[in-house]
Image (spheres, grey):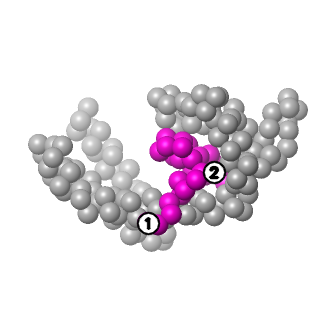
Amino acid sequence: MPKTVNSDLFKGPQQELLSIYLLHSLKKKPKSGYDLLSEIKEKTEGTWVPSKGTLYPLLKHLEQKELIKIKMKDIRSKNIFQITPEGKKMIIKAKKQGENMMKKGMRYGNLISDIIEEDSETHSIMMQIQHSLFLISKEKKNEVIKILRRCASDLKKEVC
């Protein structure tokens, strides 16, 4: 059985997702634990905010695994965390696994659509769009974003 990102690192899917997100966020720029919590709250529109009792032990664990390190303490003695080269490698590995899972999931999408929806055509089209997004080149990305924004705007007009 191939090793996954979860191998001996995290306990459960929620902590694995949170750990990978922390690494992803710290790749953009170093942050404090408070900054990370605030960011997650914003990204999830407040529907999920891990507790400090979840976040800080996880940051400590990532530090022990040498995926992040403390860059410095700010003026209020808050730790500012930054990703390490090993942490960046972990993100690449997780991204590849995520893409493979998405591709596999898309193969079964129409079956799942039939099970969960009366009208599986809508779900099937969404799966086709999602699959196409994996295939677009960087050069075409901006044009695709424009198309998707127009589509989202048109859908909003129809639904609302």
For residue 86, side relative to residue 91 (left or right): right
Task: Identify the residue at image location x=65%, y=40%.
Answer: 58
Going from N to C along the chain, the mark reached first, 2 or 1, is: 1
Observer able to see residue 99: yes
Q: CA distance from mark 2 to mark 1?
A: 25 Å
For residue 85, side relative to residue 160 (left or right): right
Q: Is residue 52 above or below residue 119?
A: above
Task: Identify the residue at image location x=22%, y=38%.
Answer: 158
Q: Which residue is mark 1?
A: 1
Q: Residue 151: horizontal and vertical position, in percent?
A: 31, 50
Q: Residue 133: horizontal and vertical position, in percent?
A: 38, 62
Amino acid type of the residue tagged 2 in the rendering: Leu
Q: Residue 81: horizontal and vertical position, in percent?
A: 75, 45
Q: Nearer the viewer, residue 155 or 45?
A: 45
| Label 1: which secondary element | loop
- Indicate the quadrant where residue 74 lies: top right
Q: Which residue is mark 2?
A: 23
18 magenta-colored: yes
Task: Identify the residue at image location x=14%, y=50%.
Answer: 114
Q: Residues within 10 Å of mark 1 (few under 14, many from 20)?
A: few
**Please, which residue is most extreme toward the left here?**
118
